Amino acid sequence: MKVAVVTGASRGIGYAIANALAAKDYKVVGISRNIEPGAPFALTIQADISDIESQTAVLSQIAAKFGRIDLLVNNAGVAPLKRMDILEAGVESFDRLMNINLRGPFFFTQMVVNYMLEGDAVRRIGGEELKKSVIFITSISAVASSPERAEYCVSKAGLSMAAQVYADRLASTGISVYEIRPGVIYTDMTAGVKEKYDKKIAEGLIPEGRWGEPEDIAKAVAALAGGEIPYSTGTIIEISGGMNIRHL
Ligand SMILES: NC(=O)c1ccc[n+]([C@@H]2O[C@H](COP(=O)([O-])OP(=O)(O)OC[C@H]3O[C@@H](n4cnc5c(N)ncnc54)[C@H](OP(=O)(O)O)[C@@H]3O)[C@@H](O)[C@H]2O)c1
């Protein structure tokens, strides 16, 4: 049995990740503020990732039911409720994004990897070596500036560095840490800016010429899960239809 914990699993990218991992025989624990038991989930837990005090109870539920965690996917995240120029952006929105996108996953990861380390980090299942992993879903916004949602960019840049530091600290333990940077993916988060990005994509914003789908990110997570790319950690994989390409 191998167990994956996916935060923000109720919809969008997280739900697609849950489906892809269930298809790879993971028991998937889905966490969101509102989540219904359903197809890809072996366990669902309603929790707010920014509520650090409730995190111990979340881990207790997982530990009681499965006794192990093999993979953590830090996917839960939010955009600003309202886009505001960096010269006007307010403290409330800044704190909301830091709490949900950075502070929550930073401490959730700390708790989960300490739990992972209580067992053997590297396990053998049917003779096959299964490494434990942590995957951070950040964003191209970790490195691409959007002056009308600076707090989102800063939260994702912080999460990107958290991935590097966890990777560094855990490299010798057998726990691999990866960062996946999605580009522009069609979900509830981007539904409100669909027309804006339809136009930008038509004008050439994305080399591959289309919106990303949640399944594009889920396939990358499934490919990384289970240590199938050995001798790698702290690796950043951008899934953005080529927005990473610098061109003239
Ligand atoms: N869509 C994109 O273009 C794009 C691009 C780059 C990166 N990303 C990142 O990818 C991740 C998933 O985004 P998405 O597009 O799939 O967004 P989405 O469709 O809005 O889904 C967000 C998920 O996170 C959960 N969530 C939000 N706040 C939470 C909290 N405080 N505690 C626990 N769960 C919470 C939501 O469930 P509840 O509301 O029920 O809690 C939902 O399951 C985010 O980290 C986002 O920043 C998205």
Image: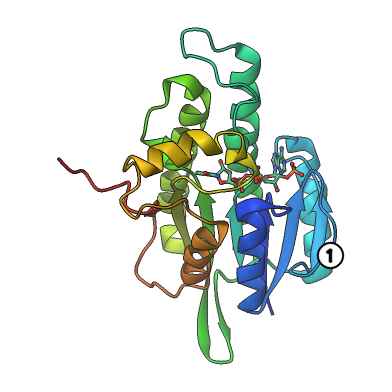
Q: Is residue 115 visible?
A: no
Horizontally, is 66 left or right of 2 in the view? right
Identify which residue, 248 or 48, lies in the foreground: 248
Q: Which quadrant holds the N terminus?
A: bottom right
* Residue of label 1: 64
Quadrant for ligand 1 reads top right
Horizontally, is 30 left or right of 151 in the view? right
Secondary-structure class at tag 1: helix
Identify which residue, 244 or 28, lies in the foreground: 244
* Residue that sits furthest to the left in the current view: 248
State the image quarter where residue 192 is shown. top right
Rendered view: 11 above or below 120:
above
Q: Which quadrant holds the C terminus?
A: top left
State the image quarter where residue 120 is shown. bottom right
* Residue that sits furthest to the bottom in the current view: 126
Q: Position of residue 43 (x, y in %)?
A: 81, 64
Rendered view: 89 above or below 205:
above
Q: Position of residue 226 (x, y in %)?
A: 52, 73
Horizontally, is 197 left or right of 89 in the view? left
Identify which residue, 171 or 91, lies in the foreground: 91
The crowding category of the residue bearing disc 1, from other C-alpha atoms within 10 Å (few below 14, some 14 to 19, many at least 20), is few
The structure residue drawn at horizontal position 55% and vertical position 34%, both measured from the top left corner, is 193
Q: Position of residue 139 (x, y in %)?
A: 46, 43
Q: Is residue 221 visible?
A: yes
Q: Amino acid at mark 1?
A: Ala
The structure residue drawn at horizontal position 76% and vertical position 40%, both measured from the top left corner, is 48
